[in-house]
Amino acid sequence: MAPRLRLIRPWTALALGLALGALAAAPLPPALLEWRAAAGPGEAWRVLSAALAHLGPPHLTANLAGCAVVGAFGAVAALRPRWAMAWAAAWPLTHAALGAWPGITHYAGLSGVLHAGVAVAAMGLLFDGRGRARAIGAAVLAGTLAKVALERPWEAPVQTVPGWDFPLAVAAHATGVGAGLVCAFVCGIGGWLIAARRQGGAAGP
């Protein structure tokens, strides 16, 4: 009898899709895909494409490594499909929220979406986990919030960081975490309501 095919979990598929999309977009000029504050409604697709644009090989390599880490985190945590949906929803929100930050005229890269993924994964462990898993989720979330706080994006949303030949829009890390938390909270509450409704129906006459 032929062995059963194992489908890739949605979380892993999303991480892999982001990485492959970034690789496919590497030959294109970043200006074609980046998020722009001055973009009109006809360019709304930039809230998605911005994650695939990168400003050189080091930028791309760092974010591909980030995709591997976030994807592996979700795979080891065995996150349910709904958390992949929350991460996917946070993807465009991460970039759309950049419009609220003065001084950011354009943005390219996966770092904001990856921060959103970490926030969603941590919340997934807090909602669905037990004991040690929940403690890991709390620790990861606390560490992520501390990282964003130390970057102080409210003082300088775009910062010059040693080792990078372009300014980093650290505000995208904050919007990513914010979007991830909002989408994960909605997803988590929705999951609880659905579960409660099913239990209520099962207990009915």
Image (cartoon, rainbow, N blue to C red):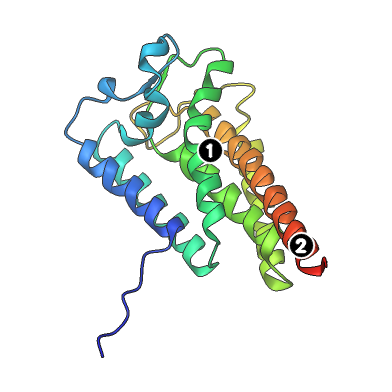
Residue in front for this viewpoint, 62 or 184: 184
What is the number of the mark on residue 122?
A: none
Circles 1, 2 touching at the beta carbon (< 8 Å): no
Residue type at mark 2 is Gly
Numbered label tally = 2
Could one spot residue 26 in this view of the protein? Answer: yes
Residue 200, quarter of the rendered image? bottom right
| Quarter of the figure that contains the N terminus | bottom left
For residue 196, above or below residue 175: below
4 and 157: which is toward the camera: 4
Tell me where residue 88 appears, x and y as whole percent.
Answer: 48, 43
Q: Tag 2 or tag 1, which sits nearer the N-term?
A: 1
x and y percentages locating residue 169 in the rendered image: 47, 27
Residue 173 picture quarter: top right
Q: Is residue 146 visible?
A: no
In the depicted structure, whether residue 142 falls above or below residue 32: below
Judging by the rendered image, the residue that carries numbered circle 2 is 201
Q: Is residue 146 above or below residue 160?
A: below
Say which element carries label 1.
helix
Q: Which residue is mark 1?
A: 90
Q: Which residue lies at the image location 63% right of the left edge and 21% below the top edge?
A: 155
The kind of secondary structure element at disc 2 is: helix
Residues packed near mark 2 inside 10 Å, few (<14), some (14 to 19) or many (20 plus): few
